[in-house]
Amino acid sequence: MEFKEYLSLSQPELVKRIEQAKREKNALLLVHNYQPMEIQRLADFLGDSLELSRRAAQTDANLIVFCGVDFMAETAKILSPKKKVLLPDHQATCPMAAMVTAQALRAKKRQYPQALVVSYVNSRAEIKAESDLCCTSANAVKVVQSLKDREIIFVPDRHLGEYAARQTGAKLILWEGFCYVHTKFSSPDVQRARKEHPGAKLLVHPECPWQIVEQADFVASTSGMVRLAQNSPAGASFIIGTEVGLVEQLKAAHPDKNFYPLREDAVCKQMKLNTLAKVAWAIENEQHPVEVPEEVRLKAVKALEKMLSIV
Ligand code: 13P
Ligand code: SF4
């Protein structure tokens, strides 16, 4: 069936087709916390980048449908090379991951020959292949801590790097990458939100600039925020400094608690490219398969596995 025919199907019809195809093909639907709610509801596993990579490494499914962005699907393929990994929309690419090229990183390594390279998982396979270790937002501090006495080139997110450096005291050579969603947050946003919601705790993602992070009550990955919300009493209130998909998830899961986005327009356009029609088309037609050249994969997998062995 052509993609345009899926567009005329109703939501319940699409859901039925996705569920049937999942059963028939022994497929696993991995979904990131920023995905649209109608896709989050279908997830076999919903989580942050670290949890999703663990799941991808462990699954015995034949097919992984990755509802997130390109580097996540690529990570799944690196860790599970024998599985077919699908990215329903091949334009779902993280702009931050494109902010470091292998050529530029190699030049930096020549400039700092003693330094180790830690790459945020929000990076391309060839960057992971040039790295000693990977990290995610959930484990960046522990990963950097494990190398504390070494000089470290940290790519590509300068804000996550700064957060890890401040938490550990490690000497990090930062790259100039950033997430356009998290760098929207400003101090006036924090002041306004605190005034509008007195008593609410401010939870922010470590991709936020330091001037936001230093004002937060908690700093956590997306699933870290999910756990904080789960473990809070009824009536608790939170201002959420990350992409709004997570705020929607928290509101749906905890109607007895209050969640306010730090900014309503903190939307990752690339994460929102996915639709039920695309997921149904992707799983039925096994599109778009993610490929990583084997010589790149063999190097990249070492940096990812080292990360998974630390945390
Ligand atoms: P985590 O879900 O791992 O915290 O990452 C957020 C993110 O920006 C993914 O693109
Ligand atoms: Fe990339 Fe930021 Fe979107 Fe995450 S939220 S996928 S880091 S652009």
Image: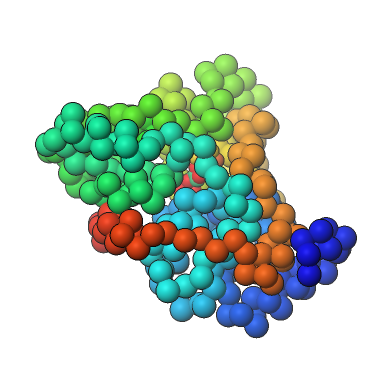
Tell me where residue 306 appears, x and y as whole percent. Answer: 25, 57
Describe residue 245's horizontal placement relative to residue 227 as left or right: right
Tell me where residue 129 appears, x and y as whole percent. Answer: 30, 51
Report the colour scheme.
Answer: rainbow
At x 47% / y 50%, what residue is drawn?
Answer: 71
Tell me where residue 284 appears, x and y as whole percent. Answer: 69, 72
Name the image quarter holding the C terminus: bottom left
Of residue 120 and residue 206, the one placed in the foreground of this image is 120
Of residue 233 and residue 195, the one placed in the foreground of this image is 195
Q: Is residue 237 above or below residue 308?
A: above
**For residue 297, what is the image quadrant?**
bottom left
At x 19% / y 41%, what residue is drawn?
Answer: 116
Describe residue 228's horizontal placement relative to residue 157 as left or right: right
Q: Is residue 176 above or below residue 92?
A: above
Outermost residue toward the bottom in this view: 24
At x 27% / y 43%, what residue is drawn?
Answer: 118
Of residue 74 and residue 140, the one placed in the foreground of this image is 74
Of residue 207 and residue 134, the one placed in the foreground of this image is 134
**For residue 285, what is the image quadrant?**
bottom right
Q: Is residue 237 above or below residue 22?
A: above
Outermost residue toward the top in this view: 188
The answer to whether any part of residue 211 appears in the image is yes
At x 64% / y 81%, what residue is drawn?
Answer: 23
**For residue 140, what is the image quadrant?**
top left
Give the total number of marks visible in the rendering: 0
Tell me where residue 123 appears, x and y as whole percent. Answer: 41, 44
